[in-house]
Image (cartoon, rainbow, N blue to C red):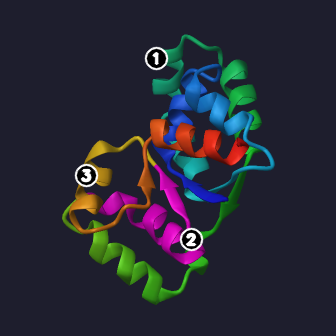
Amino acid sequence: MNVIIDTNIVFSAVLNSSGKIGDLLMNSHGLIQFFGCDFLKEELLEHHEKLKEISNLSDAEIQVSKGLLFSKITFIDTRLLPASILLQAEALVENIDPDDTEHVALALHLECKLWSGDKKLRRGLREKGVFWVLNTDEMWETRTTLQS
């Protein structure tokens, strides 16, 4: 199963790699293939000081955590997506959060689910009839079902 992972999920996993999110990312090999937008790495770099402050981890510990997590994600350059997909994604998120356009576009392009901790995004898309955006509990249930 292919799943797009958004930035807030990876951010959470760096903060607590031994939690449910970290477990899902690190221990779903063979069941779930994670994909992410290439700019996700840049976003985490921009928020490095916030990660450091919240987590009380050292620079080196954050780098190790990100390296381990990034090894579980296939990154895709969203500039390579067809314009029609980007326009469709823009229309879906325009009155929710335009910053999520690329994550939604990648999910549309790969025809797979999007794992997001963004409640506003999930709620807004569900109101539009989009039910392929999952929260962490739904991802946990999905992996459990795939393991059966």
Alpha carbon of mark 1 to alpha carbon of mark 2: how far?
A: 29 Å
Q: Which residues are magenta?
A: 97-115
Q: Disc 2 on helix, strand or loop?
A: helix
Secondary structure state at the residue bearing disc 3: helix
**Could you say where residue 94 lies in the image, as x and y percent from the top left?**
24, 69
Q: In which quadrant will I find the C terminus?
A: top right
Residue type at mark 2 is Thr
Q: CA distance from mark 1 to mark 3?
A: 27 Å
**How many residues crowd around disc 2 within 10 Å: few (fewer than 14), some, or many (20 or more)?**
some
> Viewer-proximal residue, 45 or 145?
145
Question: Residue sitting at 56 percent across and 71 percent down?
Answer: 78
Q: Decide whether residue 106 is among the magenta residues.
A: yes
Label 1 is placed on what type of residue? Ile
* Left or right: 94 in relation to 134: left
Query: Could you say which is closer to the camera, residue 39 or residue 32?
Result: 32
Q: Nearer the viewer, mark 2 or mark 3?
A: 3
Quarter residue 16 falls in: top right
Which one is earlier in the sequence, the residue at label 1 or at label 2? 1
For marks 2 and 3, the one nearer the N-term is 2
* Residue appearing at x 44%, y 65% in the figure: 104
Q: Which residue is mark 3?
A: 123
- In the image, residue 145 sits, relative to residue 22, either above or below, namely below
Query: What residue is shown with label 1?
Result: 54
The numbered dot on residue 78 is 2
Q: Main secondary structure of the magenta part?
A: helix
- Mark 1 residue element: helix
Q: Nearer the viewer, mark 1 or mark 3?
A: 3
Image location (x, y in percent) of residue 35: 64, 57
Crowding around mark 1 (Cα neighbors within 10 Å: few <14, some 14 to 19, many 20+) is few
Reading the chain from its start, which is encountered first: label 1 or label 3?
1
**Quadrant of the rendered image containing residue 69:** top right
Where residue 116 appears, as percent x and y from the top left, is 44, 47
